[in-house]
Amino acid sequence: MEAKTKDLAHRRERLHRLVDDMNEGELDTVETFVEFVRERGDTLLRKLMKAPHDDEPVTEQEEAGVREAWGDYEAGRVQSLEEV
């Protein structure tokens, strides 16, 4: 098997393992993202991958917002894209 084909097969197997370990909420999110990438995200994804690294320092207010958001997520205080 060619090296590139082996690498692709390995990556697909890894993705399958990751998906198999996800809970229902994570699956919903990943499904939506994958559908987006397949339908129209390829150009966006390439642009994001080429974007320069954000080297601005994170403020205390931003860190607090991230902690609050994760707390909401972990407590189930979230809405699906369909609900929004």
Image (cartoon, grey):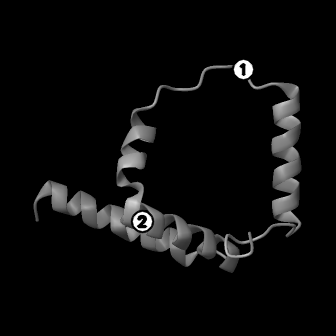
Can you tell which quarter of the image residue 35 is in? bottom left
Q: Nearer the viewer, residue 4 or 35?
A: 35
Residue beneath label 2, please? 14
Q: Position of residue 48 (x, y in %)?
A: 45, 40
Q: Label 1 sits on what residue type?
A: Pro
Q: Nearer the viewer, residue 60 or 48?
A: 48
Q: Position of residue 44 (x, y in %)?
A: 42, 47
Q: Is residue 3 above or below residue 21?
A: above
Q: Nearer the viewer, residue 59 or 80?
A: 80
User: Does 68 sit left or right of 9 as displayed?
Assistant: right
Q: Nearer the viewer, mark 2 or mark 1?
A: 1
Q: Position of residue 16 (x, y in %)?
A: 44, 73
Q: Nearer the viewer, residue 47 or 73?
A: 47
Residue beneath label 1, please? 57
Can you tell which quarter of the image residue 11 is in? bottom left
Callout 1: few (<14), some (14-19), or many (20+) C-alpha neighbours within 10 Å? Answer: few
Q: Residue at x 65, y 70 (%)?
A: 26
Placement of the N terminus among the 4 image quadrants:
bottom left
User: Does 6 sit left or right of 42 as displayed?
Assistant: left
